[in-house]
Amino acid sequence: MDQLTSTASANDAPSLINAGTIGGDRPGAGPQTRLMAVIAVARHHGLDLHLEDFRPALNETVPSPASLAAWARDQGLSAKAERVRWKHLFKLQGSERPASPVVLLLKDGGAGLLVGSDAARNVIWIRDPAASSSDPAIPVDELRLSQAWDGEVLLIRRLRGDGEGEQRFSLAWLMGLVAKEKWSLRDVSIASITLSALTIIPPLLVMTVVDRVVTHHSLSTLVLLSTILLITTMYETLLGYARRELVQVVSTRVDARLHLHVFNRLLGLPLDYFEKNPAGQINYRLMQVWKIREFLTGKLMGTFLDMFTLVFLVPLLFWMEPTLAWIVLVCAVVIALVIMAFLPALRKVIGKMTIAESEKASTMVETVHGIRTVKSLALEPQRRSEWDERTAKAGKLKLQAGRLANWPQTIINPIESFIQRGVIMIGAYIAMQDTSGIAVGGLVAFMMLGSRVTQPLVGLARLIEDFEDVRASIGQVAMVLNNPNETAAMQGGLRPKFQGDVTFEGLTFTYPGAKLPALDKVSFEVPAGTMLGVVGRSGSGKSTITRLLQGINREYSGFLKIDGVELREINLTHLRRSFGVVLQDNFLFRGTVRDNITAGRPGLTLEDVIKASRLAGAEEFIERLPQGYDTWIEEGSANLSGGQRQRLAIARAVIADPRLMILDEATSALDPESEALVNANLTRLGKGRTMVIVSHRLSSLVDCNLILVMDKGTVVDLAPHRVLLERCAIYKMLWSQQNRHLDGAMGRPPPLVPVLAQGD
């Protein structure tokens, strides 16, 4: 640090800050400096971030602390935004130990990197995020820094072990999620303890009124007791409101964190999981989160708070009348034992009912998604029959579970009635037998307090019954979220700048559960900027090649390299954003045409959208739409034709100017006119890019630089169209099958035309 001190003095700091040396107004600085600061800290931890990966919040011109922290967390770092004071900066960045740089978020929207401090001299060292690590840092004192900084910092560090997003979904994880609200829970506990203590006062006042005020006709004592009761009621009301408010805050926070975690884990699941599991079943299982949330922040928390009452009331009950207190406790234990005796059978039925409900939900969602096919083929009777069958099965199991749960309730009811009514009879008998024992007022007070004690004890017993249902729900959600995900591959790995050279070296891949490999020792090389066509019979491995290129399946042997870098070493998010992909059936989101085209790059302008639309041949029909680029696309793209949807998908794929493009049967579902428009643009689209075009229509591939012929998962040939016609038997056969109508067309007689017979 002494060397740094010699380069600039503390007195120079204000001019350096105000001049824009640290996130100021110089060209290229401003809001982007915050992103550069996060990139610099990430690089310190061995991760390489890119500006294009940042996704700002809606209508956010300056990256907010929350957006920056979320970006860092998405890349596999631990990040949080805080507001600190000057003295805390010395703890964050000590002079005697190396520490991670701290991002200081400045008032003008810029940022600086805190890289060192000297408590003895009361200065810190700040570096411009755009500067190199060899450039000297700037010493700044408290007065000068306060002119540009108001206390906001972004703390970023490398995760140790599994981050929160990687932890398995379980009851222990859920309890840890609730425990994060420890400070709010502490306040709730204090309020609950105070309320529990206050619940003792009204029964004791009633006891005093019955035993003394009524007996001695003391009006002054009655007024005093009434005043105390009024004050106690006011405190109870205020504390009750405060506790309910705190519980609501905790519930809202837990609910938000829970749903954010669920959705992030869902997005991290690989594509093949969604291909193998029905959408309705996945949706039903995830919807069980609502039941879990209600249990955690409702019944569980309510019962836990009511348990504080026992700390005060149980000792008081034993002090007032031990015999009656033991009766209340024994009855509560009997209730718990009855419920626990029915739990194994109830758990089994609830498990079957949950599976039946998921199957029913799967039928519903599948029917909604395929309603066009259902209507066109008149499949309503078949779908109705399946729905009736699964509804009947689920209803039968639900009735069975309800009947089974009704038995413990039937047994418990008399015990609860005895606690509420029978205890007073026993208490009256004890009072008559022992004149020195409990008095009439004490008996009334005991009944008031006893009901308060019974409620949490019975609630605790019933909580065990409710837990079985929630445990089944946790298992359902875990069946989705605890599957292997792509999160690690999306956060780590290399981020090379692609040129487009693709190489397969002895690659073999077999789908899980399949006996034969989909690709068997495939080897070929495609130079950068090549337009590659891929043809072959059905099942020859054409689409498998595109899946591997996108990193959808990564469990292969051999090598798949892009520009010499093995694909499994590349950051998965970076890889997929480097590809522009157009499929046979492309999904368009509900929203405007512009929103769909910029779906992958929300920060792009209308000029970029028009340029991409022109390149995809979509500009003409977009301008004819009612609101042009602001035309709303309905769910399922019902207001667009197939060709229009396809050209919008191409515009969406090329707007980011990818170096590699994949068109997987992109024209197979189009009418001849739309296909001709798309094919006419292929040469223009492929300029400067590597394009992989999978198609069963060979006529659309004749202009490709190279055509790869596949058969039974192996490479048959790789050459231009004219060469393949001469030397590749499979390609020649496929070409002849698709173009046989051209053979001998000139030599065939004209078709017969029917003529209507004319009478005389």
Image: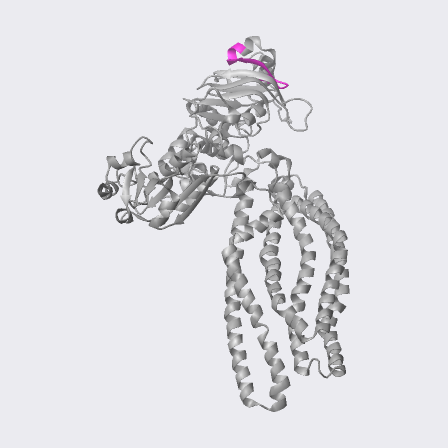
Q: Residue at x 72, y 45 (%)?
A: 385
Q: Quadrant of the N terminus?
A: top left
Query: The magenta stretch spans which residues?
Result: 709-723
| Side of 418 relative to 215 (left or right) | right
In the image, 314: left or right of 612?
right
Please check the rendered image and state whether residue 722 is part of the magenta-colored stretch, yes or no: yes
Q: Is residue 347 left or right of residue 496?
A: right
In-image side of 86 versus 625 (left or right) = left
Asked which quadrant contains residue 399, the reply is bottom right
- Residue 475 position, x and y percent, is 66, 46
Locate the C terminus and report the quarter of the image it occupies. Answer: top right
Q: How many marks?
A: 0
Note whether residue 452 is visible.
Answer: no
The picture places residue 151, in percent across and down from the top left corner, at 35, 49
Q: Which x, y percent locates residue 262?
A: 56, 45
Vertical order, 409 against 446 (above or below): above
Q: Residue at x 53, y 75 (%)?
A: 233
**How would you classify the magenta stretch by its main secondary structure?**
strand
- Please state which of residues 41 and 753 is positioned toward the viewer in this rendering: 41
Name the residue located 74 percent from the left edge and 59 percent from the top edge.
339
- Say which residue appears at 57% left-offset and 42% top-offset: 167
Q: Quadrant of residue 318?
A: bottom right
Res 184 visible: yes
Task: Please state the horizontal and vertical placement of residue 669, each as a whole percent of the image.
Answer: 55, 30
